[in-house]
């Protein structure tokens, strides 16, 4: 029983990472219809910003995190304004290629600057917390709480604020939103900036919990998209549940079957779900 | 990926251009993971090979039948991808006209190239790769300087049972890598001979960073010790996460990581008391288990790259000097003559950083395999200290390897 509880806690940590990634991806895809494959690399880049400020320049951790988030937000807006500028008018394949190209560009740039070695971001949160039979480090708990807080905050902004209403309006019908006087450019920039800020937080937390390596974003984005597809686009609660399913399913597969089958098992499960529910587990019904 | 490859090719090109075009040259190719998950070993091996080339060229080059030849080194990045490694080799043979091949981090990178190496008569010296299959498979052109993992595993298993008093042990490692199966078979055999047993074997992939699920399963078997068979970066995560999960037993390993390599991921206190059982690689604080050139090499490596040489760099440096000595002994760069020289040569007297054990007076045994002693190291006060030289049954191992190799003919 103790082993099972610990495996569930291990899975919850992974679920939290996937949730933060899926949140950023979901916003970008929902509003701009861009499959932002470079998002994992953006997250890792944010982590490297944190690493430079904390490890190399010796800035206080909170200031470093805020600086990394600020730079990542600006970088995100720049991405929206430059490579993705005409994304709304391009065929899906072109956007797909731009996104993949961007991912490769970012990975190689990080490789050139930081080299192939792995580096841990020194977050100074390695203290142990014992919750009954479950052991967690402070940083793992911080990651779980961060994922919960940001998800709740995003949900509140989307549902209760004017900005959220505008974002939802752009996501549902760009032309109508434009006619209602909503700045599509402004909303797009906000969404990209916000997603990149969340990405930076993921990168820093990931770098503190594990380590940063230039190509790590490729693996992260894989599971972020998997969670979105499993949930079905446009359902926040569904995305949360999907991330929980994937993280915990992975942990239990590794713990009780074999690590060699964990990724395969996750994707077999997703394919099976899509066979019976092609729009995902929690997609809203679409009337044609 | 493409940029990294271009940079690598460019860098190699710059290296080549440093030699004078009027002097005769010997072109040597190298393929390593210079990026990706095993770059932690690939980059240092590349550095040590480049340094050996530099030193040999500074000494005037290789004497081939009375005429000095400079070495041109072409280094390419295979990203620990066997397909890329094979493509690199073909590219270097067909376009760069390499005469010899060196490097490799894993049997999975060099073994797919075995037919091509044999067909093209390309003498190949394999460095850090710990796979037994490299010399258990009969290819007269391939020589292996690092002792296979089970050579160390058997000795380690006995040591763990007898000296560390471990009765039950869980194993966590990169089980899909070729060397791991051999290593664990050796460890298991050694531990069982002392009355101990392995409670579970938990695997993960090279590059995985969250090992908590495997460790939770391992800890649930209540082992006296957890043995980690993996690269230094993976091992760092295992050690750290085992402690984070509250594990209080012994942590043991087979990774050869240096302090600088570990400290990129974990703090020194995580390593306290951990044993590393590996071939006797270069140790900065104690050269009793190393070759006579170890300290000079360490100083020169630091001066060249501004970092301490990781323990495994001795293989690359010595490998290049062994090849140079073999070419000099052959008096020609003809592949078959150099292979014959490698088969017959004694351990070179100069520029050896490691303590090579001759087999019947020769550098390589009849399987083209070289040996150094096994040793145990222990992390104490933030440093990896030599604990003791372990039993290294070279003759017995060599005979066993020969039987497998002959069966592969």
Image: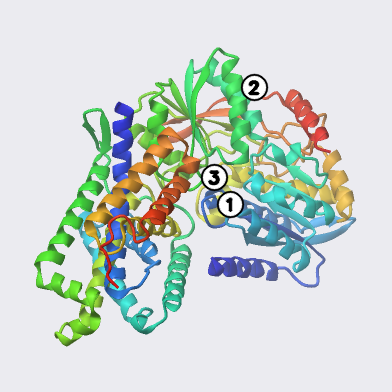
Disc number for residue B391? 2
Instruction: Tell which residue pokes out farthest to the top in this image.
Output: B195
Which of the numbered marks, if any, corresponds to residue B310?
3
- C-beta proximity under 8 Å, tags 3 and 1: no
Q: Is residue B257 left or right of residue A155?
A: right
Where in the figure is residue A160, as x and y percent of width and height? 9, 66
Between A250 and A74, the one nearer to me in the picture: A250
Mark pair 3, 1: CA separation = 11 Å
> Which residue is tagged 1?
B42
Q: CA distance from mark 1 to mark 2?
A: 28 Å
Q: Which residue occupies 37% across, 50% down?
A: A120
Residues at marks 3 and 1 on the same chain: yes
Instruction: For residue B272, say whether it is visible.
Output: no
Q: Chain of mark 3?
A: B
| Residues at discs 3 and 2 both on one chain | yes
Above or below, B320 against B347 in this view is below
């Amino acid at each position: 029983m103790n082993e099972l509880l610990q495996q569930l806690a291990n899975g919850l940590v992974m679920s939290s990472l996937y949730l933060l990634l899926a949140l950023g991806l979901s916003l970008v895809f929902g509003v701009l219809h861009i499959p932002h494959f470079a998002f994992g690399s953006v997250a890792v880049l944010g982590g490297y910003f944190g690493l430079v400020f904390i490890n190399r320049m010796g800035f206080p951790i909170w200031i470093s995190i805020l600086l990394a988030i600020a730079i990542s937000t600006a970088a995100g807006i720049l991405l929206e304004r430059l490579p993705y500028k005409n994304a709304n008018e391009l065929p899906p394949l072109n956007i797909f290629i731009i996104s993949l190209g961007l991912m490769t560009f970012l990975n190689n740039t990080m490789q050139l600057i930081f080299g192939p070695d792995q580096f841990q971001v020194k977050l100074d949160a390695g203290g142990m917390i014992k919750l009954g039979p479950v052991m967690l480090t402070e940083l793992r708990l911080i990651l779980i709480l961060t994922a919960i807080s940001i998800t709740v905050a995003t949900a509140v902004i989307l549902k209760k604020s004017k900005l959220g209403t505008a974002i939802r309006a752009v996501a549902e019908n760009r032309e109508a939103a434009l006619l209602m006087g909503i700045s599509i450019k402004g909303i797009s920039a906000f969404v990209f900036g916000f997603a990149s800020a969340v990405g930076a937080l993921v990168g820093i937390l990931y770098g503190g919990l594990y380590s940063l390596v230039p190509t790590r974003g490729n693996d992260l984005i894989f599971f972020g998209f998997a969670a979105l597809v499993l949930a079905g686009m446009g359902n926040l609660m569904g995305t949360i549940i999907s991330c929980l399913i994937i993280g915990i399913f992975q942990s239990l597969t590794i713990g009780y079957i074999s690590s060699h089958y964990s990724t395969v098992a996750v994707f077999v499960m997703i394919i099976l779900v899509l066979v019976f529910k092609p729009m995902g587990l929690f997609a809203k019904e679409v009337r044609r | 990926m493409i940029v990294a490859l271009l940079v690598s090719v460019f860098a190699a090109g710059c290296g080549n251009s440093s030699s004078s075009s009027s002097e005769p040259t010997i072109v040597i190719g190298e393929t390593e993971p210079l990026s990706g998950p095993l770059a932690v070993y690939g980059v240092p091996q590349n550095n040590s090979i480049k340094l050996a080339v530099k030193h040999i060229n500074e000494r005037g080059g290789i004497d081939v039948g009375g005429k000095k030849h400079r070495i041109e080194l072409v280094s390419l990045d295979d990203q620990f991808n066997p397909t890329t490694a094979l493509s690199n080799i073909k590219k270097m043979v067909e376009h760069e006209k390499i005469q010899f091949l060196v490097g490799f981090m894993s049997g999975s990178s060099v073994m797919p190239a075995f037919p091509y190496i044999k067909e093209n008569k390309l003498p190949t010296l394999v460095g850090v790769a710990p796979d037994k299959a490299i010399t258990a498979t009969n290819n007269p052109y391939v020589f292996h300087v690092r002792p296979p993992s089970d050579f160390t595993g058997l000795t380690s298993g006995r040591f763990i049972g007898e000296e560390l008093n471990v009765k039950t042990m869980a194993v966590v490692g990169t089980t899909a890598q070729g060397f791991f199966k051999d290593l664990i078979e050796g460890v298991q055999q050694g531990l069982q001979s002392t009355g101990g047993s392995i409670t579970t074997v938990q695997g993960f992939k090279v590059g995985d960073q969250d090992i908590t699920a495997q460790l939770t399963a391992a800890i649930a078997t209540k082992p006296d010790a957890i043995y980690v068979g993996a690269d230094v970066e993976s091992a760092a995560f295992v050690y750290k996460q085992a402690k984070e999960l509250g594990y209080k037993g012994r942590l043991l390993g087979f990774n050869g990581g240096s302090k600088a390599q570990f400290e990129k991921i974990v703090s020194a206190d995580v390593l306290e008391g951990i044993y590393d059982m590996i071939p006797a690689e270069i140790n900065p604080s104690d050269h009793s288990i190393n070759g006579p050139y170890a300290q000079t090499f360490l100083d020169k490596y630091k001066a060249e790259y501004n970092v301490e040489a990781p323990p495994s760099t001795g293989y690359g440096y010595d490998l290049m000097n062994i090849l140079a000595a073999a070419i000099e002994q052959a008096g020609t760069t003809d592949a078959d003559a150099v292979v014959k020289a490698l088969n017959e040569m004694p351990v070179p007297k100069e520029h050896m950083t490691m303590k090579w054990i001759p087999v019947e007076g020769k550098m390589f045994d009849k399987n083209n395999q070289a040996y150094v002693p096994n040793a145990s190291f222990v992390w104490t006060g933030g440093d990896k200290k030599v604990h003791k030289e372990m039993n290294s049954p070279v003759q017995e191992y060599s005979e066993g390897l020969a039987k497998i190799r002959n069966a592969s003919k």
